[in-house]
Image: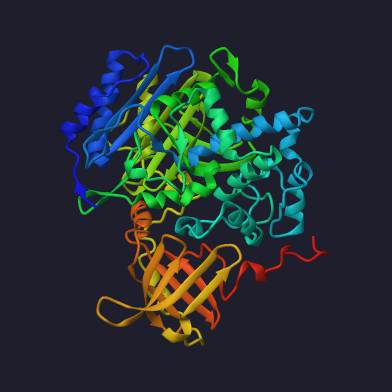
Amino acid sequence: MGNFKLPATLVLFLAWVSHSTLQNVIPPELEEQIDTFVVQMMEKQHIPGLALSLVRSTGDLHFTKGYGLRDLENNLPADNNTLFAIGSASKSFAGVIIAKKLNELFPALGESVLDVPIRELAPTYDFTLVDRYRSERVTFRDLLAHRVDIMAEMSGMLAQAYDTVDEMFFRYRYAPESEPFRTTFHYNNGLIAMASHILAHMANTTYENLLGEFLTDAGMMDTTWIKPTDDHNNMMFRAVPYIWKDENHTRYNPELLKSVSFILASGAILTSANDFTKYMLLHLNKGKVGDRQVVPEEVMGWLTKVSSSTYDAITKTPEDPDALVEVSVGYRICLYLGVYNGWVRVGHTGYIPPYITMFYLYPDLGLGMFASLTGPGPGGFELEGFTSAIFNMVTGSPVKTGNLPKIDYHSMFNGFPTFDIRRNANTRSLEWAETNAVNISLEQAVGTYGSGFNGEINLSIRTNENGNPQLYWKYGKMGEAWLIQVSPSTFLLSKWGSDLWMVYWATGAGFGTLQLTFLDLNTIRQKELGQQLTTEFIRGEKLDDLPLIPWQPDSC
């Protein structure tokens, strides 16, 4: 992997030479103001490549542009046809597609179809969750509004621990309850993807086919998605991801991007500034593309009702009495609802390390905004402040460009564990002090351990670079690490054996931490950066050993 710096002069040059396949409609002075601001921010935040779209439904604003380079090593410029991975912004597509298809399958039900239990709509789909009540009562609205309240899958997804999509969704029946059903907004990538899987089963097709049909109807001919067979570095028009390390850009291993290939509906779309403009116009025009009603206006209206309550805000303070108020108040069907400077705002963020994406729609202004970049990750960029500044330029509001507001990325990028490494700095010493009666030798630790929900990990003894035996952890296709024993029952990350560390680095968590603690001879509790993101792993446990129905027949 090479290390590169992107000169500010080159960023500026490429920004001006990038051109659109559609004529931009924008006041020259506004374009100059935006260009200057974007280039300054890219230099300050070490951003290799960036896509930006601005559009009004009235037609008096249409601006798409690529900035910087999509490939540093090969000096390839980013333009408005360059494809960026948009992560969870993909969910908004799923919301539209699922609502549209449900309306076609059950036209008599109207919007109430979202509130009919899955078991009733899709009786031939094996929909089974942790308890009888959820299994019998969960609806599409529950899945699409993050209110099922079961444990989210993250570690196995990042490690690519599943062989098939069907296996991943089958394992969700062993995901434990996180909170009581429908009591909290509990972000869950896997359940959005499961909703698309259920819909495809009902329509006797695949979600890939449904998405492809929608993209064609919307005129988004360049948009595609991450696939397990991709050779990302050598595919045309794709923006290469980078992290910022040792004061240089380091190319991110694109094989890590395939973690989302099984959850296409939740986070695998690749799109361009040009194509995303068409998508925003479809929303702003209530389902119309030109003169064609691609999605019924009534169905587009289903997406506008708040289904889960959330709250996150920037408000005025004594230290910043001139702050522009920014509030997130709820989650619709795969779209956040909020208010910025008095204007209603809907949209979604996206984060697939190290790509960051945000798109916002301001319905009362007929305005849409999209920004996506190739790194270096949320630890190094304040995208919320960036998009707010662009909005202020477009609307003529005061622009604060010198000190953009800090955002809580734990809420902004819900669904991906964004860690504060300083907060976890004492994790190791605290965990080392754990007292446990179990005394595990290297030889006793060796074995394969299974989790019904999270797949399998393997522990073996290998000879390290110093010629000594050392415990080695393997999880899925991408998770490999050397472990060191720090207490009779606990092993910690010593050195990564794969590029999985890049995921942590992109989130601002350094090289990350990994801890395995034996609760007894056959049970492992795994923690990443001090947080338990999986269920326990049991020696020798296989899916075939577990009950197909994870609850008792007479339970509720």
Closer-to-camera residue (240/89):
240
Residue 336's spot in the image, x, y percent? 54, 36
Position of 293 relative to 352 (above/below): above
Q: Is residue 173 left or right of residue 322?
A: right
Closer-to-camera residue (135/121):
121
Residue 425's spot in the image, x, y percent? 35, 65
**Does the rendering let one see residue 68?**
yes
Image quadrant containing the C terminus? bottom right
How many marks are shown on the rendered structure?
0
**Does the rendering let one see residue 336?**
no
Task: Check the image and tell me how it is coloured.
Answer: rainbow
Q: Residue at x 21, y 36 (%)?
A: 75
Position of 111 relative to 469 (above/below): above
Residue 199's spot in the image, x, y percent? 67, 40
Residue 129's spot in the image, x, y percent? 69, 56
Q: Is residue 227 left or right of residue 329?
A: left
Picture quadrant where residue 46 is located: top left
Q: Residue at x 47, y 67 (%)?
A: 527
Q: Is residue 26 left or right of residue 271?
A: left
Picture quadrant where residue 293 is located: top right
